[in-house]
Structures are given as structure tokens and as C-alpha cells.
Image (tube, grey):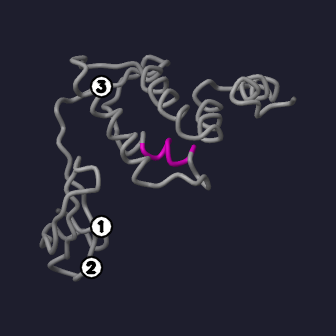
């Protein structure tokens, strides 16, 4: 594993343990050149899943991109990081076991929306504002009013 600090090709595993949900192995590593310590995660990947975008582009499914999107929606909310990890792992598992080699980006967005709906109304609305591409404040207000009376009332 390449060191993220100095770029050296070799590192030594100092500690390995499963993550809380058991879906990955967390490894603490130390660079053999500069001595820096860093953490890596090893996950099972059942199959390669491609994502087709609305503009016609295709790209490989990127778990980290999905994680960042959900974390942004959940920022400054009382949501445990382990819960976010389980949400993302669950969506990834659904995609990999679906039997489809390609999925539309909007399907992934809908899966996240469904999962966030039961999590936190604010995170749900934040994600929806990007996913549904609200163009005016009225769009946002209309959507928010449908979610537990968060709009005008």
C-alpha cells in the first residue's frame, strides 16, 4: 500500500480489526520509509457496477463519492458516523447484489433519499435539494412543507 504522505510503495500492517458493522477490515499501517501511520479499509466487492449519468456519461460506482454526498447532507446533524457507514454499505450491497452491471445515477439518488427519509428530515431535505436540483426557493419550500411541516405553516 502506497504511503499517502511520502508515496513510498511499501507499508507494514500494525493492526487489523473488523469495522463495527463487519462489512470491512480496518488496517493501521506504517510506512517503511518515513514511518508515518495511516488507516486503510478493505471491503468485499461482489461485482463491478457502472453508473450512467443523466448527461449520458458512464463511470464506475464510487463508494467514496456516495459517502461524501451523504456526509454533506448529514453535516452538523446528530447522526452517528457508524449509521452513515451502514447506510452507504447497505446501498452498495444492494447495487452489487442486484444483478445489474449498470445502474442510473438517479436510482442511486432515490435509494439515498429513501434511506435518509427515515434518518433525519434536515439531511433528507439537504440531499433532495441537490438530487432534485431545486431551481427556486419555492421548489425548496414546497418540498420542505411535505416533509414533516418544515416549510411555512
Residue placed under numbered mark 3 in the picture: 50
Establish if 124 lies above or below 102.
below
The answer to which quarter of the image holds residue 142 is: top right
Dot 2 or dot 3: first in sequence order is 2
Distance CA(mark 3)–CA(mark 1): 27 Å
Gap in angstroms between the C-alphas marked 1 and 2: 9 Å
Task: Identify the residue at image location x=52%, y=52%.
Answer: 79
Q: Is residue 152 magenta?
A: no
Q: Secondary structure at mark 1?
A: loop
Residue 36, disc: 2
Q: Position of residue 40 (x, y in %)?
A: 25, 61
Question: In what element is the residue under mark 2?
Answer: loop
Sequence-wise, the earlier of marks 3 and 1 is: 1
Q: Quadrant of residue 130?
A: top right
Residue 68 falls within the magenta-colored stretch: yes
**Compared with residue 39, is residue 51 higher up or lower down, i.e. above or below?**
above
Q: Nearer the viewer, residue 6 or 13?
A: 13
Which label sits on residue 4? Answer: 1
Amino acid at each position: 500500500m502506497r504511503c499517502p504522505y511520502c508515496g513510498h510503495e511499501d507499508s507494514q500492517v500494525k493492526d487489523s480489526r473488523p469495522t463495527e458493522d463487519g462489512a470491512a477490515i480496518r488496517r493501521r499501517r506504517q510506512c517503511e520509509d518515513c514511518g508515518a501511520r495511516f488507516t486503510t479499509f478493505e471491503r468485499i466487492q461482489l461485482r463491478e457496477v457502472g453508473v450512467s449519468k443523466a448527461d449520458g456519461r458512464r463511470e464506475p460506482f464510487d463508494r467514496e463519492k456516495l459517502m461524501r454526498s451523504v456526509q454533506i447532507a448529514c453535516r452538523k446533524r446528530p447522526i452517528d458516523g457508524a449509521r452513515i457507514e451502514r447506510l452507504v454499505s447497505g446501498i452498495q450491497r444492494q447495487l452489487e447484489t442486484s444483478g445489474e452491471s449498470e445502474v442510473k445515477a438517479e436510482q442511486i439518488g432515490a435509494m439515498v433519499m429513501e434511506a435518509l427519509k427515515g434518518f433525519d428530515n434536515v439531511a433528507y431535505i439537504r440531499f433532495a435539494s441537490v438530487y432534485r436540483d431545486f431551481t427556486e426557493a419555492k421548489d425548496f419550500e414546497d418540498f420542505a412543507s411535505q416533509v414533516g411541516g418544515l416549510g411555512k405553516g
